Image (cartoon, grey):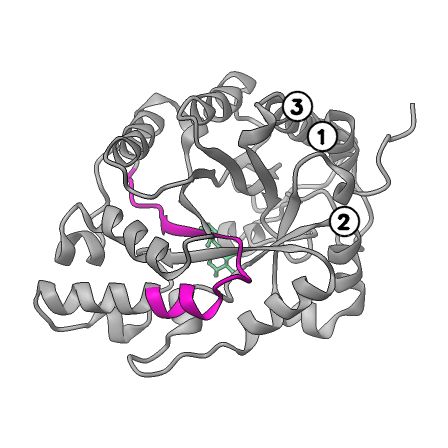
Amino acid sequence: LPPALGSLREAAFPFGAAVNVTLLRANAGYQGVVTREYRSVTGENAMKFRSLHPDAATYTWADADYLVQYARQSNSRVHGHTLIWHQSLPAWVTGFQGDSAAWENLMRTHIQTVVGHFRGQVASWDVVNEAVAEDGTLRPSVWRQHLGPDYIARAFQYARQADPDARLFYNDYGHEYGPTKRTAILSLVNGLKARGIPIDGIGLQMHTNINRSDANLAAAINTAAQTGLLVHISELDVAVNPSNLATLTWSDALASAQKAKYKLIVQTYNALPAAQRFGITTWNVSDADSWVRGYCSCPDWPLPFDASYQKKPAYDGIVEAL
Ligand code: XIL
């Protein structure tokens, strides 16, 4: 059978990609693929703390505003990533000297200014990203150190105040690693929900690879849905070089292993109740612009489009699952 869909835009739930704004501005071919295929966009880096708020009194909106304007013109949704994270912080924050009240003011001002700036234009936010460590404890980030563990709850409250219509997510990776981290994340999220903290959804980054078991991938998705919250697969990619080999050749075997994992993930997600399917976002667009190659310093081909922006078997696997 030929693929049933003309593009991922036609999926029953919003399919999106993390977008490199420099490429979006400069490369018409890149922008063309993003517009043709995706109806949700996340700034790969453009809305991170260091990008938007490089000095205490300086906000730099140009790239993020460009992304928002692009999305409006192309009928796409914008997902905001991310307000509070231990990475991508400017030096003025990591070196900030102040008591807990001064830190609270820093966090609140950042959230309210950023969410307020994009109010009505950014549909959803990763309010807090990666707060949980691999062993299930709260990561000892600057936020945790200076504000105590309940900084997470307060970040959601500040975001809700700044844009009552934005959907608010807790985003993390590793739900598919196994129960330790997954259970810790789910109990954090369920605890927030039980206390009436304004959280709407859970983001599963899903930076995964061809060796991850189908059972663990499915458990990640299905247990997230048991929270009753919206579920966003927020940063999907499927690496084919999980041991970071220095040399590796792309092959039909890798292509079909990768296709099978994409298909399993999208099929499992598609079986969730429609009201909980916030969307699936891949992290980047093509193998040429994937963050994975830089992160692992190794060859890899993690995405549904090849370096020439042609569809790979992974793309067919997604379409077959939709
Ligand atoms: C990555 C970007 O892709 C890189 O360009 C940047 O140098 C570092 O951050 N989890 C996240 C994303 O939540 O923000 C990360 O993005 C990838 C892992």
Mark 2: few, some, or many residues within 10 Å (few <14, many ≥20)?
A: some
Taking depth in this image into account, of 320 and 77 the one nearest to the observer is: 77
Most extreme residue toward the top, as rendered?
215
Please state the extent of the stretch shown in magenta in the rendering.
112-133
Percent x, y of residue 59: 40, 79
What residue type is disc 3 on? Answer: Gln
Q: Which of the two labelled residues, at mark 3 and mark 2, occupies the earlier sequence position? A: 2
- The Cα–Cα distance between marks 1 and 2, rounded to whole angstroms, is 18 Å
- Nearer to us of marks 3 and 1 is 3
What residue type is disc 2 on? Answer: Glu
| Residue 89 counted in the magenta span | no
Q: Which mark is residue 17?
A: none
Q: Which mark is residue 267?
A: 3
As displayed, is residue 48 above or below residue 316?
Answer: below
Percent x, y of residue 319: 77, 32
Most extreme residue toward the bottom, as rendered?
57
Quadrant occupied by the N terminus: top right
Q: Residue at x 54, y 70 (%)?
A: 64
Read off the residue under disc 2: 37
Secondary element at tag 3: helix
Read off the residue under disc 1: 259
Mark 3: few, some, or many residues within 10 Å (few <14, many ≥20)?
A: some
Q: Is mark 3 within 8 Å of ligand 1?
A: no
